[in-house]
Image (tube, rainbow, N blue to C red):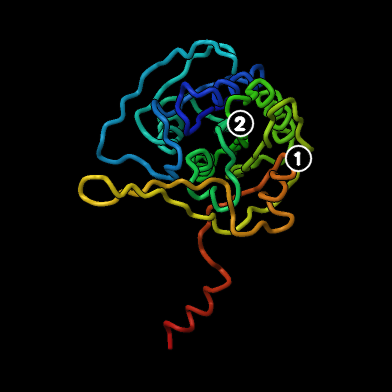
Amino acid sequence: MRILLTNDDGISAPGLQALRHAVEGMGEIHVVAPATVQSAMSHGVTFGTPMAVRRVSVPASPAGPAFEGTSVAGRPADCVKLAIAHLVPAPIDLVVSGINAGANIGINVIYSGTVAAAMEAGFLGVPSIAMSLHLGDSSLTRWDAASRHARAVLKRLMAGPLEKHTVLNVNIPILDRGVEPGPMKVVPISISPIVDRYQCDEETEGGPHYTAAGHLEFHYTPPESDVEALFQRFITVTPLHYDLTLRSRLARWTEHVAE
């Protein structure tokens, strides 16, 4: 099996190192990831601007052993597109994006570069998994434990129906202070809006400047959703799709424009 790893936190991120350690021995592993942090870039791609591609050696750290990879001066979706088109020998059997430093749940999946990389693979017919870790106290983040749980999750999911175009979104709950997560729970994403908060600096030249200051705070938490399950310390699994057509309204709008 040939596995492509990527992320949105950059090629030197501890989460990617933990993921690389998690997939050790599962197949032929290739790492193609952004050269710099690309969080919340959603599904942006680069057109008209050359993207530098470099081989990179990432040294060992508490998150995992050293590894070799390819950095791309672009966005997560660029990395997947380039990897499939040019950088990795075909066929790629699976794309895994992560482990993101922070949960990607609810409506947040729309903004996530981690999820966008997995979605891009799905577009191109390669099954994919986006993996994220809900962070508590960042000084207590246990990337070694995240790697261990990611490996167990991947083994379970890879034994399932990972057909072409399959995209799975996985979130591992907070692992601070030796806490262990509950089992995997397959749940839909919450469609509750995020509570938007902004900090305003009135003293800046040219007028006020606003900085987004929100966190994973939602207006409500629907039962049996990914938000509820993750907050209850379950590992969440959500199958995603990228057909944006609202098919239930096609007939009504066809009638309307024909009137």
The residue indicated by pointer 1 is 184
Residue visible at 56% across and 26% down?
15
First in sequence, mark 1 or 2: give its number.
2
Q: Position of residue 255 (x, y in %)?
A: 49, 83
Image quarter in which the C terminus is found = bottom left
Instruction: Report the amino acid beneath label 2.
Output: Asp
Residue identified by numbered label 2: 137
Residue at 50% from the left image edge and 48% from the top image edge: 214
In the figure, is residue 3 to the left or right of 176? Answer: left
Tell me, yes or no, whether the two marked residues, 1 and 2, touch with CB atoms within 8 Å.
Answer: no
Instruction: Point out which mark residue 14 bears.
Output: none
Q: Residue furthest left?
A: 206
Left or right placement of residue 172 versus residue 34 in this view? right
- Percent coordinates x, y for residue 44 in the rendering: 39, 44
Asked whether 205 or 50 is in front, the reply is 205
Q: Is residue 55 above or below residue 217?
A: above
Residue 257's x, y, as percent? Answer: 42, 82
Task: Name the amino acid type tagged 1.
Answer: Met
Nearest the camera: 251 or 150?
150
Q: Is residue 26 left or right of residue 198?
A: right
User: Where does the N terminus fall, quadrant-wise?
Assistant: top right
Q: Residues within 10 Å of mark 2 (few under 14, many from 20)?
A: few
